[in-house]
Amino acid sequence: MKRKRFITIGTFDGVHPGHRVLFNRLEQLAAQYLMKPLALYFPYPPKTLLSPRPEMTVLSTPPEKKYLLKCAAVPAEELNFMMYREYTPEHFFKKVLLQKYDCGGILAGPDFAFGKNREGDGAWLRRKCEQLGLPCEILPFYNAPDGAKVSSSLIRKTLADGRIREANGLLGRRYSLEGRVVCGHKLGRKLGFPTANLDVNFYKLLPLGVFAVRVRVGRKYYHGICNIGFRPTVNSIHSVIPLTEVHILDFHQSIYGRRIEVEFYDKMRGEMKFDGLDALKVQLERDKCAAREIIPQADLAA
């Protein structure tokens, strides 16, 4: 006899500790009711896809999210939001959950809502499951040690405010981004600080400023300085998307066209306009020393 599925649905942006608590509970409920667990997720938050300003609004891109869900060891399948956005809660529940995914029970978070205009909230879900005799559980918010309710929106705001260490604590790991190295103006090279300009996903949240980072190139890790901004001193850029530049310390390889990963340890300062290139160079030397102090040497061997 084919086993039904105990299902949870969400965006799971960032796959933070609150999400992992949800997945653990999903496994428990699936085992209790002799079902298979399944997490259905949207690659991008619906709010992002519907927003007139969708740039820099997600913690995890679809490939990152897929990897994080795999690390969380939860069986997961993508949902195409644009395909289902006009479905009423009743239609979505019947056609998608019951018929397509053979749903036998539902687990949801406290802010869960689905269907057109988010009309299928937790109360709706409880009533529907009760009518059909299906188990249903709404999990409360996961609280951080300081009592804060951990949510993707809180983490996004904390990152945007430049509070990197706090955001990393809420996220349960260091915030990171990936990008392909593309050609730039090569001004950094002339200053003795060559930078890798990164082509980053349009939707990826980019905190502004200068950061101490760990950079992964292939399988090796290096100290680094990441500047995300609009280059006010030279070659100012005029765009809604800031430029992401990484200076990798003690690194002398050509990596144009390669993808690298950047992990954020802490914000060192905001982006500043300097009185000429000499002043900029002096500050970059200070940033280099600060980055070495912030990142433990042991982390480079990880």
Image: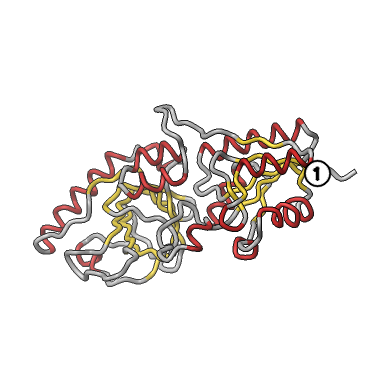
Residue found 36% across the figure and 38% down from its top = 166
- In this rendering, the count of numbered labels is 1
Residue found 51% across the figure and 63% down from its top = 49
Q: Nearer the viewer, residue 15 or 103?
A: 103
Task: Locate residue 189: give its quadrant.
Answer: bottom left
Q: Position of residue 265 (x, y in %)?
A: 35, 43
Q: Position of residue 282 (x, y in %)?
A: 14, 54
Residue 159 in view in this figure: yes
Q: Nearer the viewer, residue 231 or 107?
A: 107
- Depicted 25 relative to depicted 39: above or below: above
| Quadrant in which the N terminus is drawn | top right
Q: Position of residue 170 (x, y in %)?
A: 43, 38
At mark 1, the secondary structure is loop
| 300 left or right of 38 in image | left
Task: Locate residue 229: give its quadrant.
Answer: bottom left
| Classed neighbour count for the residue bearing mark 1: other residues with Cα under 10 Å, few (<14), some (14–19), many (≥20) | some
| 12 left or right of 246 in image | right
Residue 255 in view in this figure: no
The residue indicated by pointer 1 is 4
Residue type at the position of mark 1: Lys
Task: Locate residue 292: give its quadrant.
Answer: top left
| 151 left or right of 157 in image | right
Name of the residue lying farthest toward the right = 1
Q: Position of residue 283 (x, y in %)?
A: 16, 52
- Depicted 234 relative to depicted 292: above or below: below
| 165 left or right of 80 in image | left
Q: Nearer the viewer, residue 195 or 238?
A: 238
Residue found 53% across the figure and 58% down from its top = 46
- Depicted 106 relative to depicted 261: above or below: above
